[in-house]
Image (tube, helix red, strand yellow):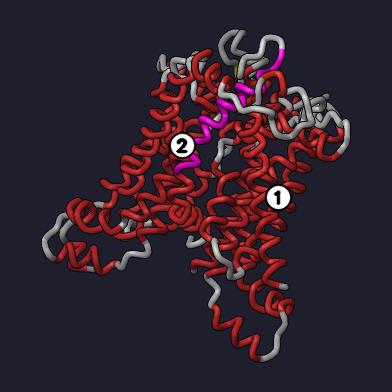
């Protein structure tokens, strides 16, 4: 009996999490004429017309590519700079570690609305408006603190003796970092990279403000500003939003354990 | 460690790239926005002109600002309370032994992982007054996003759906890290489920619960994406939060001075919550 109520509870939670996504999937496969008729809940036939028009009617592929480049580059930079910083903070006994980590944590909490106006002026002055470089640079403002914070919590779990031993054996700090610490921190690096990529992939405010055309526009912005001259094209929006969700979906299904590990390292083990 | 130090440790070399980038994209903009908030400066007007605290004084008499502040506080309080309560419930449920916990974890992770803009579009369609599935299932004819009373609650419901998984997964990890021995010993002593929760789970989970509360508070207070897509702040500004109002002043009215003052208010509120969190962390660390 308790077993049964437990499974009913789990089923309800799954339903709650999945139902909106399932409805969006049904919408994307529903013929245009049936979008404005309820009932029936299930479409009478399935169609891919919305996917075809979403992918061909707009420079959607270009914006997908923009999203990949912006999120990918931001993740690469955050991992490269962030792992070096986290290494120095946890293994090299730098002075003022507590203070530095506090500052890093504080910057990761900065509301983007507070920095968007000065960054806008800077990007304009540099002639970077509507470029991917503008996004990659500004994404560092949240990607880097997140990466440092999560990685520091992962690296802290590696025994300090590892680094000391490598140094005694004649490694320079850089060699110890590159050959000893980083390989051991690979699970942490993966978790951090996934976390940063998802957050950057989903970013909206900066992309909305710093881009103007499909040259640099990312998919979330495209979906938010989906053109609808007379009526909102719900089928196309549904199709487009499922396409942009797909990469995240794959990452989540493939790496759920790692992502949750990253999330908890970011919040708990501080 | 002393011997190692003599080899010439230079942590600064490893820290420099990260700190340089952080200074450029976070510290500098914050100082810049503070300066902007003290200027009379419109992008369509001339050069910035020093205005002392004029922008802040204008805030005090701006009814729309107070409305946005109230809306933000209401949105934050209600959605965070629901997210933490619901998240705790889900965490405790998933902590029970059952087959397929890994799959459930992936399912619960999904709402958190999808872009907020996408989630908002999904809910916008479900909320649709004419063809929305929510009205169909409830048998109602409510214009959820067009009605001044319902719109803010519709936004809260969407945020709860999107953010509860974060709370649930963190609390689940915390709950699973509590030693099973504690529960077994208490059970041997005849403790029922309520007493197990009251005397083991609750006290051990409380620090983490507080951290989740702060993380969610900070995120909810700066909410932008969800409301921008769902309602754009309408109807009649009933869903206009501080971030939305600041964005409109900045990029629609192009008033960079006044908009920056609004942005500073958001920043200061969040800084206050963050300070509490950092203090708390330092106490648990030392």
Q: Magenta includes A235?
A: yes
Query: The disc numbered 2 marks a residue on which chain?
Result: A
- Are circles 2 and 1 on residues that touch, CB within 8 Å? no
Q: Which residue is found at the position 62% from the left and 57% from the top?
A: B168
Q: Is residue A10 above or below residue A196?
A: below
Residue segment shown in magenta = A231-250
Q: Is residue A156 above or below residue A86?
A: below
Q: In the rendered structure, find residue B80 and report the number of the disc placed on it.
A: 1
Question: As drawn, which residue projects farthest toward the bottom?
Answer: B189
Question: Which quadrant of the view contains residue B156?
Answer: top right
Question: As drawn, which residue projects farthest toward the left?
Answer: A170
Few, some or many C-alpha atoms within 10 Å of disc 2 (few <14, some 14-19, many ≥20)?
A: some
Q: Which residue is found at the position 87% from the left and 31% from the top?
A: B142
Percent x, y for residue A59?
Answer: 48, 15
Look at the numbered disc 2 and give the secondary structure of its residue.
helix
Q: Foreground: A154 or B284?
A: A154
Percent x, y for residue B139?
Answer: 87, 37
Question: Which quadrant of the view contains residue B130?
Answer: top right
Q: Which residue is found at the position 72% from the left and 23% from the top?
A: A34
Q: Which residue is found at the position 65% from the left and 55% from the top?
A: B213
Q: Foreground: B77 or B147?
A: B147
Question: Which quadrant of the view contains residue A205?
Answer: top right
Percent x, y for residue A80?
Answer: 31, 42
Q: Quote the CA–CA distance across marks 2 and 1.
A: 28 Å
Q: Which residue is mark 2?
A: A247
In this view of the protein, can residue B237 be seen by the observer? Answer: no
Q: Magenta includes A222?
A: no
Left or right of A32 on screen, residue A51: left
Left or right of B199 on screen, residue B24: left
Q: Is residue A81 above or below residue A206?
A: below
Q: Are marks 2 and 1 on the same chain?
A: no
Percent x, y for residue B90?
Answer: 66, 59
């Amino acid at each position: 009996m308790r077993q049964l109520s437990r499974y009913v509870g789990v089923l309800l939670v799954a339903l709650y999490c999945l139902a909106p996504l399932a409805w969006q999937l049904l919408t994307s496969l529903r013929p245009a004429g049936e979008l404005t008729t309820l009932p029936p809940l299930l479409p009478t036939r399935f169609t891919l017309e919305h996917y075809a028009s979403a992918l061909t009617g707009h420079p959607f592929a270009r914006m997908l590519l923009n999203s990949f480049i912006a999120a990918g580059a931001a993740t690469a930079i955050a991992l490269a700079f962030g792992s070096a910083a986290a290494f120095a903070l946890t293994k090299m006994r730098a002075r003022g570690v507590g203070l530095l980590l506090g500052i890093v944590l504080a910057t990761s909490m900065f509301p983007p609305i507070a920095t968007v106006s000065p960054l806008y002026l800077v990007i304009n002055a540099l002639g970077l408006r509507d470029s991917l470089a503008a996004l990659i640079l500004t994404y560092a403002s949240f990607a880097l603190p997140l990466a440092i914070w999560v990685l520091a919590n992962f690296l802290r779990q590696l025994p300090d003796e590892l680094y000391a031993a490598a140094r005694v054996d004649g490694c320079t700090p850089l060699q110890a970092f590159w050959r000893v610490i980083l390989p051991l921190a690979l699970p942490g690096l993966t978790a951090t990279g996934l976390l940063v990529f998802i957050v950057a992939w989903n970013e909206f405010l900066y992309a909305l403000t710093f881009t103007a055309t499909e040259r640099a526009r990312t998919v979330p912005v495209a979906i938010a500003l989906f053109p609808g001259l007379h009526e909102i094209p719900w089928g196309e929006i549904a199709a487009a939003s499922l396409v942009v969700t797909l990469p995240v979906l794959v990452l989540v299904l493939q790496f759920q354990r790692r992502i949750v590990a990253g999330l908890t390292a970011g919040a708990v083990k501080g | 460690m002393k011997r190692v130090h003599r080899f010439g440790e230079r942590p600064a070399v490893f820290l420099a790239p990260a700190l340089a980038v952080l200074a450029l994209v976070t510290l500098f903009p914050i100082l810049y926005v503070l300066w902007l908030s003290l200027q009379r400066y419109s992008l369509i007007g001339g050069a910035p002109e020093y205005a002392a605290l004029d922008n802040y004084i204008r805030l005090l008499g701006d009814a729309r600002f107070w409305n946005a502040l109230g809306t933000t506080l209401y949105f934050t309080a209600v959605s965070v309370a629901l997210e933490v309560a619901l998240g705790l419930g889900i965490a405790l449920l998933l902590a029970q032994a059952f087959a397929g916990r890994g799959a459930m974890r992936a399912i619960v992770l999904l709402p958190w992982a999808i872009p907020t803009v996408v989630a908002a579009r999904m809910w916008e369609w479900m909320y649709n007054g004419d063809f929305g599935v929510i009205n169909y299932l409830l048998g109602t004819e409510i214009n959820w996003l067009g009605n001044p009373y319902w719109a803010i609650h519709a936004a809260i419901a969407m945020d709860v759906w999107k953010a509860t998984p974060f709370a649930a997964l963190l609390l689940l990890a915390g709950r699973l890290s509590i030693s099973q021995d504690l529960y077994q010993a208490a059970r041997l002593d005849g403790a029922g489920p309520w007493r197990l929760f009251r005397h083991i789970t609750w006290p051990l989970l409380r620090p983490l619960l507080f951290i989740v509360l702060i993380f969610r508070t900070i995120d909810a207070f700066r909410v932008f994406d969800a409301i921008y897509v769902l309602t754009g702040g309408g109807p009649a500004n009933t869903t206009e939060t501080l971030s939305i109002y600041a964005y409109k002043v900045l990029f629609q009215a192009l008033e960079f001075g006044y908009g920056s003052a609004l942005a500073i208010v958001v920043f200061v509120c969040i800084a206050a919550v963050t300070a509490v969190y950092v203090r708390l962390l330092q106490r648990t660390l030392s």
